[in-house]
Structures are given as structure tokens and as C-alpha cells.
Image (cartoon, rainbow, N blue to C red):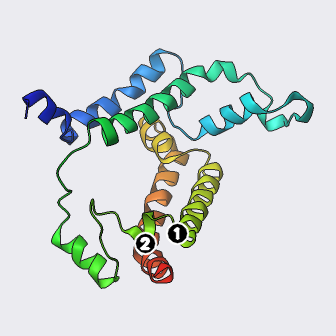
Amino acid sequence: MDPLLAWLHSPWPWYVAGPLIGLMVPLMLLIGNRSFGLSSNLRHLCAIAQPRAFSVDFFDYNWREYRWSLVFALGTVLGGFLAGVVFANPHPINLSAGALALFAQWNVPIAEGYLPPVLFGFQLDSLAVMFIGGLLVGFGTRYASGCTSGHAITGLSTLQLPSLIAVLGIFAGGLLAAHTLTPHVLAWLQ
């Protein structure tokens, strides 16, 4: 394989990707924006799409001031497509023996690509779990006044105490859910 293609098909090391993400904060401050995250884009899209006859005060603002945020979200989707489809790693993921043992303990069959079909299939139960999970993430994002990337990248770097509390809560909730809810959800889906 061509070395350039091999490099494109491999994950970037943390010491490259981390500083690139970290450089976003000074860049955002230079262009005059103090927030960096994706959750506010849903509000902007609703503000764009809302009919004037049914105007909701929450969506009644000048969304054009936040065009940069929409371009950022589009770039995130495009980057995900490029990374996952165009430059996808052709080799299977090397899961640790511990992860494979945990899936076996939960009686979750692993398909090609290590995506459990019970979670990522198109059965009604799987779609319901994804839909409910999406609602919970949306509620949590709104309740915390921002998403993980917004609080962890911008909030922490600008020394905001609410962001520290939000990040601690997000990670504690994620760990708790992964270790207590996941086995029950997987058992229900089977």
C-alpha cells in the first residue's frame, strides 16, 4: 500500500490529534467566539426552519451570527464520513481480550467489524434503544447547558466552574451507565 494511503487509513496518534483539538480554543477566541461545541447547532437549525407564523421565542434570534458554528458542524459530519467511509481502516479493530470477554459474559455476539448486531441492527428494539438514548443525550445536553465537547474543551480551558462540574457529571454518569445499565439493556435486547 502507498505510504500516504497507509497513513490516511491509520488513526492519528493522541499527540497529534490532541493538540489540534486544543488549538481550537485560541482560534475560537481570535475570531471572537467564546463557545465551542455542537449542541447549539440544533437550536440554530430550528431557528432557520421555524415558520414565522408559528414563531417560538426561544428560536427567535439572529441565527446568522452563528453561521461559523453551522459550518463547523457540517465539517464534523463531512470529516466523520471521510474518516469512516473514504479513509476507513481496512483491517479489523483489535479489541482487547478483556473487552471480548465482557461481550461474551453479556452473551453479546460480535459481528464483523465488532459491531454488536443486537445494538446496531435495524430491529425495532435496537432502534428504540437508539432513539431513547438520543432523547436522553439531548435532554442531558440541554440540562447541562452544553455538550461534552463544549464544556470539556472551551469551558475547562476558560476555567469555568460550571463546566468542571458538568464534565465530572458527564463522565461519572457515563461510567455508571456503562457498568450498570448496559448489561440490562443488552439482556433486554436479546
Tell me where residue 2 appears, x and y as whole percent.
Answer: 8, 30
Tell me where residue 56 appears, x and y as whole percent.
Answer: 85, 37
Mark number displayed over residue 118: 2
Mark number displayed over residue 78: none
Kind of residue sitting beneath label 2: Val
Answer whether labels 1 and 2 touch (C-beta < 8 Å): yes
Tell me where residue 190 appears, x and y as whole percent.
Answer: 45, 82
Classify 10 Å Cα crowding around label 2: few (below 14), some (14-19), many (20 and above): many
- Say which element carries label 1: loop
Residue at 18% x, 41% y is 10
Q: Decide: is 21 above or below 163.
A: above
Q: Decide: is 166 above or below 40.
A: below
Q: Decide: is 180 above or below 175.
A: below
The image quadrant that residue 116 belongs to is: bottom left
Q: Circle 1 sits on which residue?
A: 123
- Say which element carries label 2: helix
Q: Is 31 on the left or on the right of 42, as rendered?
A: left
Residue at far top of view: 31
Q: Decide: is 82 above or below 179.
A: above
Tell me where residue 17 appears, x and y as whole percent.
Answer: 26, 35
Q: Is 83 on the left or on the right of 66, as rendered?
A: left
Q: Nearer the viewer, residue 174 or 95?
A: 95
Residue at 46% x, 42% y is 149
Q: CA distance from mark 1 to mark 2?
A: 8 Å
Total marks shown come to: 2
Residue at 27% x, 32% y is 19
Q: Earlier in the sequence, mark 1 or mark 2?
A: 2
Q: Nearer the viewer, residue 176 or 124?
A: 124
Kind of residue sitting beneath label 1: Gln
Q: Is 170 on the left or on the right of 108, as rendered?
A: right
Q: Nearer the viewer, residue 140 or 163?
A: 140
